[in-house]
């Protein structure tokens, strides 16, 4: 019985998780194209080429993304053998890109985001344990500069 | 590919930039190494296995970032930063990001 | 007084990047590996299972090696927690009959390592078992159905066979091993524990089937030694075969081999020895 419920959750996690991930990636890609003209960079000092500065603001975006049951199990197994934990890559990638997009949404009318920084933290201390939620939070922040037009 | 963690590439002029590039990776060591590390923890000292693990992860993440920068047509990444986080026990997550630029 | 000139003036900043932004879209995602999660999953899982089964088999062989070295005294000390499992034992004509049957069988055995006892427990189960320390438990469910002394003697002799082969201790040792193993290597609350535990139980059962066959053969020989005839063995097995009908597919996970298989093994032995 326990084996059956385990298989059920694995299957559910795999199917629903895969669909949700595909959908999320599609949405990320469309929005990234939309915000392509707004650069976010890690450097601080740029020549504003004489442009008058209208406003300066701290902008930030964050996202908490959780991993599905199947991928968590896959990572647990991978932990035994060592090597690249591929199943967590999409988790991190999605969280950071989503957070970046949310930051850019805040800076929608700005011209550039300077000194951007990315922080990642795991929520639920041991993300690969059964009872905790295997999820991470990505926080992206920077200074948005808007020129007077 | 030139990598710096300052705002410029000394001796070169930055012509244009392509925004943020980043590389990340999650890696784990096999169970034997984990076991050895927890034993070593009793007496202290360098955990060679884990030093190696983090170094591998950092190299891999850096290579991924360089790949991305190359795709964009950049020849340098400036103001590079490293970040480490723990997604899963016994696994290390490395994140490296910077600004892709073209220098001359 | 001269004013000290600062060595580092700081501002204005020496670098002002004159940057032109060229928006470009990255065609590939370098941070995500392309791989088939399902394939990876099954490869890893079979790897884990393979290693665990191999380790378990090796450790199991160690248990089998150590157990025969255990003296009767040590076994009795180990067995003390098992003495008090059943408090609802019956004391009547049936239990006396069992005791007498057992005595007769024990007298025919070449070595009496343990103080063998039999107790009748009031449960509706068709079963009997060997507990550490030389105690045999027979459930009343079995007692009610088996009337013939020859057949009962076969059941008792079968359990004695387990004692002689130290199967009761091996089973205990392996059970303990399995438990420790899962706790130690996979952790008590890991989701993989259930899955791997189930698989190892399957391996355990295969072992147990071999032990049952050995106990059957021992019982057959003991019966022949005592009575000079072995009719009880086959007729008892036929009763089991009747009960088993309709539950064939459970073979792999069963502790005992199929009754039909056991009958054919017994018949072969009878033929070989000329009983």
Image (cartoon, grey):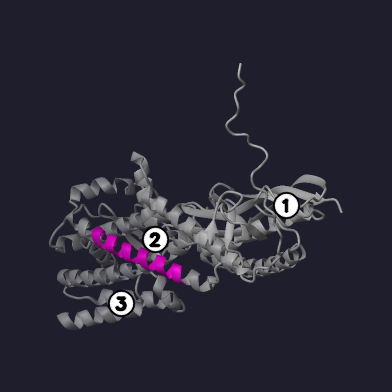
Q: Could you say which is closer to the camera, residue B77 or residue C106?
A: B77
What percent of the width, then of the height, locates residue C230? 22, 75
Q: Could you say which is closer to the camera, residue C34 or residue A44?
A: A44
Residue hosting label 1: A113
Q: Residue at x 26, y 52 (%)?
A: C133
Work out which quarter of the rendered image holds the N terminus of chain C and state it: top right
Q: Residues within 10 Å of mark 1 (few under 14, many from 20)?
A: many
Q: Is residue A28 magenta?
A: no
Q: Residue at x 78, y 52 (%)?
A: A106
Per the picture, the main secondary structure of the magenta-coloured stretch is helix
Residue hosting label 2: C140
Q: Chain of mark 1?
A: A
Cβ–Cβ below 8 Å for labels 3 and 2?
no
* Mark carried by residue C153: none
Q: Is residue C208 visible?
A: yes
What percent of the width, then of the height, locates residue C93? 32, 57
Left or right: C49 with respect to C97?
A: right
Tell me which corner region of the image, top left, top right, bottom left or bottom right, holds residue C45: bottom left
Location of residue C44 with respect to B13 vertically, above or below: below
What percent of the width, then of the height, locates residue C221? 18, 72
What percent of the width, then of the height, locates residue C239? 37, 75
Q: Residues in magenta?
A: C43-63
Query: In the current view of this chain or complex, which residue is farthest to the top?
Result: C1
Residue hosting label 3: C262
Q: Mark 2: which secondary structure?
A: helix
Tell me which corner region of the image, top left, top right, bottom left or bottom right, holds residue B98: bottom right
Q: Earlier in the sequence, mark 3 or mark 2?
A: 2
Location of residue C88 with respect to C54 vertically, above or below: above
Q: Residues within 10 Å of mark 3 (few under 14, many from 20)?
A: many
Q: Mark 1: which secondary structure?
A: strand
Q: Chain of mark 3?
A: C
């Amino acid at each position: 019985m326990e084996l059956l419920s385990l298989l059920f959750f694995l299957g559910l996690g795999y199917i629903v998780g895969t669909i949700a991930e595909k959908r999320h990636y599609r949405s990320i890609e469309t929005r990234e194209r939309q915000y392509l003209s707004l650069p976010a960079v890690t450097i601080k000092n740029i020549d504003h080429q004489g442009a008058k500065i209208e406003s300066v603001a701290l902008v930030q975006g964050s996202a908490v993304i959780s991993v599905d049951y199947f991928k968590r199990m896959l990572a647990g197994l991978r932990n035994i053998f060592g090597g690249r934990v591929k199943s967590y890559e999409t988790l991190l990638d999605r969280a950071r890109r989503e957070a970046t997009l949310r930051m850019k949404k805040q800076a929608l009318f700005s011209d550039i985001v300077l000194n951007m920084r990315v922080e990642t933290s795991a929520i639920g201390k041991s993300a690969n344990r059964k009872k905790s939620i295997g999820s991470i939070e990505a926080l992206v922040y920077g200074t948005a500069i808007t020129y007077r037009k | 590919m030139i990598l710096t963690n300052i705002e410029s590439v000394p001796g070169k002029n930055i012509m244009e930039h392509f925004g943020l590039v980043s590389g990340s990776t999650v890696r784990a060591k096999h169970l034997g190494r984990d076991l050895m590390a927890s034993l070593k923890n009793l007496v202290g000292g360098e955990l060679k296995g884990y030093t190696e693990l983090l170094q591998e992860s950092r190299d891999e993440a850096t290579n991924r970032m360089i790949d991305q920068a190359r795709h964009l047509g950049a020849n340098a990444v400036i103001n590079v930063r490293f970040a480490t986080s723990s997604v899963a026990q016994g696994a290390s997550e490395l994140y490296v990001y910077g600004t892709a630029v073209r220098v001359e | 007084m001269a004013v000290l000139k600062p060595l580092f003036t700081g501002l204005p900043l020496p670098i002002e990047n004159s940057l032109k932004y060229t928006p470009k879209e990255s065609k590939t995602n370098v941070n995500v590996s392309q791989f088939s999660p399902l394939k990876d999953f099954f490869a890893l899982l079979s790897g884990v299972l393979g290693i665990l089964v191999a380790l378990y088999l090796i450790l199991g062989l160690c248990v089998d090696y150590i157990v025969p070295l255990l003296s009767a005294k040590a076994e009795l000390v180990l067995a003390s927690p098992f003495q008090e499992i059943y408090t609802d034992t019956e004391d009547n004509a049936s239990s006396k009959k069992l005791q007498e049957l057992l005595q007769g069988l024990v007298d025919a055995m070449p070595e009496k390592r343990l103080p063998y006892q039999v107790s009748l427990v009031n449960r509706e189960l068709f079963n009997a078992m060997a507990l550490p320390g030389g105690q045999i438990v027979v459930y009343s469910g079995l007692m009610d159905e088996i009337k013939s002394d020859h057949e009962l003697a076969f059941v008792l002799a079968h359990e004695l066979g387990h004692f002689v082969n130290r199967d009761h201790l091996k089973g205990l040792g392996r059970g303990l091993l399995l438990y420790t193993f899962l706790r130690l290597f996979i952790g008590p609350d890991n989701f993989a524990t259930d899955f791997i535990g189930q698989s190892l139980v399957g391996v355990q059962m295969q072992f147990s089937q071999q032990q049952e066959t050995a106990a059957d053969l021992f019982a057959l020989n003991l019966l022949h030694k005592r009575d000079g005839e072995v009719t009880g063995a086959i007729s008892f097995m036929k009763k089991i075969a009747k009960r088993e009908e309709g539950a064939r597919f459970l073979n792999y996970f069963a502790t005992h081999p199929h009754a039909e298989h056991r009958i054919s093994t017994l018949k072969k032995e009878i033929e070989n020895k000329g009983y």
